[in-house]
Amino acid sequence: MSENQPEGRLVHEETFPVRWGDQDAYGHVNNTVYFRFFEEARIRWFDSLTLTADGQGEGPVIVTTSATFHQELVYPTRIRVEVRTGRAGNSSLENFYRVIGADDDALYASGSAKVVWINHDTGRPTPLPDRLRALSAESGQ
């Protein structure tokens, strides 16, 4: 998808301040920090659905993730992280992310992850919760 037409269905947004310590020696936000932005927004989304990610019972694990960096992000600023859903499988759900300037709507990064729902006791995949399946891009609800 293009920057103007983001992939997936928007299901959650979070706004965060960029911290001074998020920067690296080059004076911009380090590439590893974007994965923390994705993670924090994703976990807050799960929390809003009362789907815990505490390592007990059943819950999510990430099996693939990626990021594309569109322009430098520097302190001080605030960002908005969009969480979008894609296709749902039996135990998996595609997630897409966009890191956008909270004040200027500039696109700083986009990314994706494949979330697999597992039973933490067995380490095996288990069916995706109906609440997540209903929010997949293909459900249209």
Image (cartoon, rainbow, N blue to C red):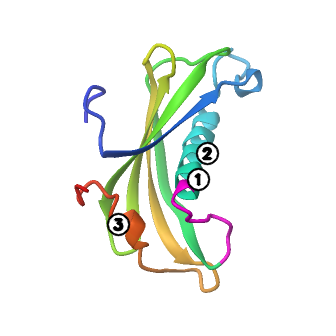
- Measure how far apart labels 3 and 1 are at the Cα level: 17 Å
Q: Residue at x 41, y 78 (%)?
A: 127
Residue that mark 2 sits on: 40
Q: Residue at x 36, y 51 (%)?
A: 85
Check disc 1: other Cα within 10 Å, few if <14, some if 14-19, many if 20+.
Answer: some
Q: Tell me where residue 46 appears, x and y as whole percent.
A: 54, 57
Residue that mark 3 sits on: 133
Quadrant hosting residue 12 = top left
Label ID, residue 3: none
Q: Are marks 1 and 2 in contact (CB under 8 Å)?
A: yes
- Measure how far apart labels 1 and 2 are at the Cα level: 5 Å
Work out which quarter of the rendered image holds the N terminus and state it.
top left
The amino acid at mark 1 is Ile
Is residue 95 on the magenta stretch? Answer: no
- By secondary structure, the bulk of the magenta-drawn segment is best described as loop
Residue that mark 1 sits on: 43
Q: Residue at x 47, y 67 (%)?
A: 116
The amino acid at mark 3 is Arg
Q: Nearer the viewer, residue 20 or 57?
A: 57
Q: Secondary structure at mark 3?
A: helix
Is residue 54 on the magenta stretch? Answer: yes
Horizontal placement of 112 versus 33: left or right? left
